[in-house]
């Protein structure tokens, strides 16, 4: 099977439940040009090198329109790109300013000090299972928990959390290259959802400017640093990014994690008996079943030689992180889920200047969620395996995960 056909198979929903055999075939050609002009990169060391290569741009404005590739969801001339779609030094300025109220060195304890509150959220959601013998882990837990968390971090009122589901689904669909929907309509719907969410956030940000609290939006509008202040438009676009990225990937991390544990009952029992296993277990999940399967929006700023192939300037590149995470040249026995794995420099959060901004929060959420689910659910069993998956091949995870269980422990 040609590499071109393999990528189409990876995008095909019929292979969403298990794309990993296709990734194994794709790695036979580490860099493969597709018929639409995209270069697919599938091996660990080549992906890692490109993630750190300043000749690789995340800015869609550098893409050669004649080079091909699918339409990009953020090609909206009315909005500035978010900082993950910028290159240094513009990227670095915005990222530094957004990091100040979120983590080290200015706010080193923000995430750590949320542990108790996050644990209470987890307990309250699981308490809601009382009297039931079956749940949908996505709808009943894995979706609401990260939404509650990111809204709390940013300062979104609790009563407004319900508004984000529709916006989030439309925006994430902008990355859904495997859908049968017309690509122009997909991009148009994604942009409209961004506008609606942006309008809501612009009003919220102005409210926080007038009456600041202890949340991240308040800190961003009142902060003064050597980099100056974020403009109103930069604040709005950054807010859209943080709200979407702050929960969509974590939903998949928790859901993929519980699915993997139920398929490996010995590991589930180990976690139940020893919660200290959670940090290493989550790292292995990020390698074994990463919530972000590939990065589809990169562009060459110069001709680059990779694994014997020259990728021409202006060409679009897709970096298949999930394939790199299963590369046997990098990881021993890569198709085995092994929480005891010590050498685990996975690509689950990317790498380089665009390393996932929210990685510390996502790690903590997944550790708390999976540990408490393992402890409290009595004899959990999958109702359906494989479960129904979301259509999106980039942000891959079950759309529903029905679980049966015998009761709750306290």
Image (spheres, helix red, strand yellow):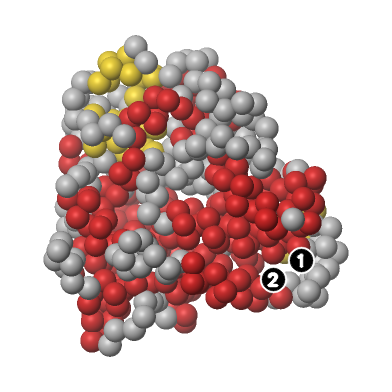
Numbered label attached to residue 76:
none
Where residue 53 sits, quadrant-wise, is top left
Callout 1 secondary element: helix
Residue at x-position 54% and y-position 69%: 115
Check the image and name the residue furthest to the top. 308
Q: Determine crowd level at label 1: few under 14, some 14-19, many 20+ residues with C-alpha closer than 10 A.
A: some
Q: Determine crowd level at label 2: few under 14, some 14-19, many 20+ residues with C-alpha closer than 10 A.
A: some
User: Camera-side residue: 140 or 366?
Assistant: 366
Residue at x-position 71% and y-position 75%: 127
Callout 2 secondary element: helix
In this rendering, would 131 be left or right of 85? Answer: right
Where residue 376 sits, quadrant-wise, is bottom right
Say whether disc 1 or disc 2 marks the residue closer to the N-terminus. Answer: 2
| Depicted 81 relative to depicted 72: above or below | below
In this rendering, would 369 be left or right of 266? Answer: left
Is there a contact, CB below 8 Å, between mark 1 and mark 2?
A: yes
Query: Would you name the residue on which mark 2 appears?
Result: 126
Residue at x-position 61% and y-position 76%: 120
Q: Dividing the image into 4 quarters, which one contains the C terminus?
A: bottom right
Q: Is residue 52 visible?
A: yes
User: Camera-side residue: 303 or 40?
Assistant: 303
Per the model, the C-alpha gap separating discs 1 and 2 is 8 Å
| Depicted 206 relative to depicted 101: above or below | below
Q: Is residue 293 visible?
A: no
In this rendering, would 376 be left or right of 226? Answer: right
Please provide percent x and percent y for residue 218: 30, 77
In this rendering, would 373 be left or right of 121? Answer: right
Please provide percent x and percent y for residue 351: 38, 40
Query: Would you name the residue on which mark 1 appears?
Result: 376
User: Camera-side residue: 90 or 252?
Assistant: 90
Which of discs 1 and 2 lies nearer the camera? The answer is 1
């Amino acid at each position: 099977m040609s590499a071109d056909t393999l990528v189409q198979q990876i995008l095909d929903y019929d292979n969403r439940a298990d794309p990993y055999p296709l990734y194994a075939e794709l790695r036979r050609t580490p860099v493969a040009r597709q018929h639409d002009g995209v270069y697919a990169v599938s091996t660990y060391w080549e992906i890692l090198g490109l993630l750190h290569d300043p000749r690789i741009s995340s800015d869609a404005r550098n893409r050669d329109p004649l080079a091909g590739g699918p339409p990009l969801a953020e090609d909206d001339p009315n909005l500035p790109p978010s900082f993950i779609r910028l290159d240094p030094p513009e990227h670095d300025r915005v990222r530094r300013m957004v990091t100040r109220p979120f983590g080290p060195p200015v706010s080193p304890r923000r995430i750590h000090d949320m542990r108790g509150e996050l644990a209470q959220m987890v307990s309250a959601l699981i308490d809601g299972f009382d009297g039931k013998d079956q749940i949908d882990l996505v709808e009943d837990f894995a979706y609401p928990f990260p939404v509650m968390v990111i809204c709390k971090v940013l300062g979104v009122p609790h009563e407004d959390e319900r508004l984000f589901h529709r916006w989030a689904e439309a925006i994430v669909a902008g990355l859904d290259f495997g859908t049968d929907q017309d690509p122009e309509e997909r991009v148009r719907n994604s942009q409209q959802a961004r506008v609606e969410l942006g309008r809501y956030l612009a009003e919220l940000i102005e409210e926080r400017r007038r009456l600041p609290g202890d949340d991240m939006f308040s800190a961003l509008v009142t902060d003064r640093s050597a980099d100056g202040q974020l403009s109103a438009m930069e604040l709005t676009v950054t807010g859209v990014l943080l709200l979407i990225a702050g929960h969509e990937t974590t939903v998949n991390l928790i859901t993929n994690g519980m699915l993997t544990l139920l398929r490996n009952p010995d590991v589930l029992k180990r976690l139940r008996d020893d919660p200290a296993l959670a940090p290493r277990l989550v790292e292995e999940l990020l390698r074994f079943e990463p919530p972000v399967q590939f990065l589809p929006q990169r562009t060459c700023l110069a001709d680059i030689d990779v694994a014997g192939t020259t990728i021409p300037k202006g060409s679009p590149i897709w970096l298949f992180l999930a394939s790199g995470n299963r590369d046997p040249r990098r990881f021993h026995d890569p198709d085995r889920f092994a929480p005891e794995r010590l050498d685990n420099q996975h690509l689950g959060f990317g790498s380089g200047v665009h390393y996932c901004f929210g990685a510390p929060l996502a790690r903590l959420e997944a550790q708390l969620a999976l540990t408490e689910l393992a402890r409290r659910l009595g004899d959990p069993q999958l109702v359906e395996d494989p479960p129904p998956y979301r259509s999106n091949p980039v942000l891959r995870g079950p759309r529903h995960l029905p679980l049966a269980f015998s009761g709750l422990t306290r």
